[in-house]
Amino acid sequence: MASVEDLVRLRRARDRIDREYAQPLNVEALARTALMSPGHFSRSFRAAFGETPYSYLMTRRIERAKALLRRGDLTVTEVCFAVGCSSLGTFSTRFTELVGECPSAYKARSHQWDDALPTCITRIYSRPVRNGKLSREGNGPEGRTPGG
């Protein structure tokens, strides 16, 4: 069990990921933010938040990529680099893994259902879900589409 002080430092590192997801971040830099060794930081982060720092970072990047793709004014490649990924292949693979469809297919389909929803609700339904589950997008409470 992490101490309260460790949890505060871990949240500081997680907040940095949330703010700077498009910047090059690695475990060493995040560990310095948390004032921990890289190994201790990785183990503590996973214990506290249920996923590794890298997985959390990629989830944030894919979440932002989905928002940019819904806008429709950027190419998949532009979105890839805008969210801090340096490899289109890795980005596409991770996007497909988390969302359940490739970035170009996601961009091409209609996203009208979320136009009338407040941003906070759109985030809930479009947030990537880990552990082999597909995105909740399009599946609101009891499997219904939001607003329908």
Image (cartoon, rainbow, N blue to C red):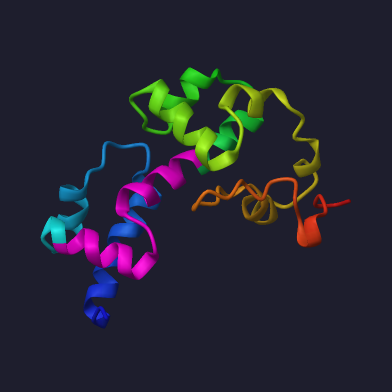
Measured along the vertical axis of the image, is residue 98 above or below residue 101?
below
Horizontal side of 116 relative to 32 (left or right) equals: right
Magenta-drawn stretch, dominant element (helix, strand or loop): helix
* Nearest to the observer: residue 73 or residue 77: 77
> Percent x, y for residue 78?
47, 20
Q: Is residue 75 visible?
A: yes
Farthest right residue in view? 148
- Write down the region rendered in magenta: 40-62
Q: How many marks?
A: 0
**Is residue 51 inside the magenta stretch?**
yes
Image point (29%, 63%), residue name: 45
Residue extending farthest front: 132
Comparing 123 with 130, the one in front is: 130
User: Left or right: 40 with respect to 129?
Assistant: left
Taking depth in this image into account, of 61 and 45 the one nearest to the observer is 45
Left/right placement of residue 109 relative to residue 40 reads right
- Residue 103: image location, x then y, percent: 57, 27
Mark yes or no: residue 34 visible: no
55 is within the stretch colored magenta: yes
In the picture, measured across the screen, residue 26 lies left or right of residue 23, that is: left
- For the N terminus, give its image quadrant: bottom left
Q: Residue at x 89, y 51 (%)?
A: 148
Residue 80 picture quarter: top left
Vertical comparison of 21 with 3: above or below: above
Residue drawn 69% across the image and 22% down it:
108
The location of residue 62, given as percent across then percent down, is 49, 39
Residue 55 placement (x, y as % from top left)? 37, 48
Please identify the residue farthest to the left as the structure is shown: 37
